[in-house]
Amino acid sequence: MAIPSLKRVNFKKVKKDVGEGFKNLAAGGFKQIFNQINQLNIKKGVDGMGIDKFINQCALLAAGSGLITGVGGISTMLIGTPLDVINIITQQFRVTLAVSYHRTGAYKVTFDDFFKIVASSVKADTKLAISKNIMEEVAEKILANLGSKVGRRLVPVVGGLIGGTVNYLFIKGVANELRKTES
C-alpha cells in the first residue's frame, strides 16, 4: 500500500470536507453522540472508581485516539482525524456528565441542560491550542537538531506523542474547568 503523497492531496477539498463535517456535527451530531452515552454506566463508573480515576480513564481513551491518529503520519491523520474528533467529543461529554453527577447526584441529564454545562467547559479549548502550539514548536526544534534522516523517521512517532498528549491534556483541562464550578 502506497502512502499518499502531499502533492496528490487536494487541501482545498479536505478543508471543505472537514468544514462540512463540523457543520453536520454541530447540526445534529452532538445530540447523536450524547444520546449514545449510557448515563447509568457513567454513574456506575464514578461510584466504582471515584471521579478522579474516571476522569483519568476518559483522558487516556482520548489520548489513545490522538496517538493512533498521529503515529502513522499523513495517511493515518487523514483517515483518523474524524474518528479522533468524535472520540474527543465523546470523552468530553462523558467527563462532563461524570462531574455533573459527582456534583449533583443526578445522573440523568437532558441534552439541553447538558449543553449548558458543556458551554462552561469550553475555556479549556484555548489552553489546548496554546499547549499544542508549544509542543509542536519544541518537537520541530528537537527534530531539526537530530538531523534530517533521523528526524524524518521520528516525525510520525512525535506526531503520535503530540496527538496523544494534547488529547489527554484537553480532557484533563475540561475536567478542571468543570470542577472549578463545583465549589
Image (cartoon, rainbow, N blue to C red):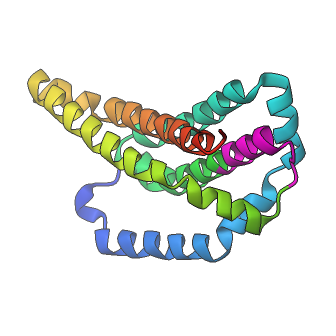
Residue 9 rendering spot, x and y as whole percentages:
31, 64
**Quadrant in the picture for residue 46:** top right
Count of marks placed on residues = 0
Say above or below: 16 vs 48. below
Task: Name the quadrant of the C terminus.
Answer: top right
Q: Residue furthest front?
A: 183
Residue 2 is at least partly visible in this image: no
Residue 100 included in the magenta stretch of the image = yes
Residue 138 lies, in percent from the top left, at 21, 32
From where the camera sits, is residue 146 visible?
Answer: yes
Residue sitting at 49 percent across and 40 percent down?
Answer: 167
Q: Main secondary structure of the magenta part?
A: helix
Q: Residue at x 64, y 45 (%)?
A: 91
Q: Residue at x 13, y 22 (%)?
A: 146
Q: Give 76 or 125, whichever is nearer the viewer.
A: 125
Residue 106: x %, y % from top left: 87, 47
In the image: residue 119, left or right of residue 29: left
Question: Which residues are drawn in magenta?
Answer: 93-108
Residue visible at 62% across and 48% down in the picture: 92
Q: Position of residue 20 (x, y in %)?
A: 49, 76
Residue 154 within the magenta-colored segment of the rendering: no
* Horizontal side of residue 36 vs 72, given as left or right: right
Residue nearer the viewer, 163 or 168: 168
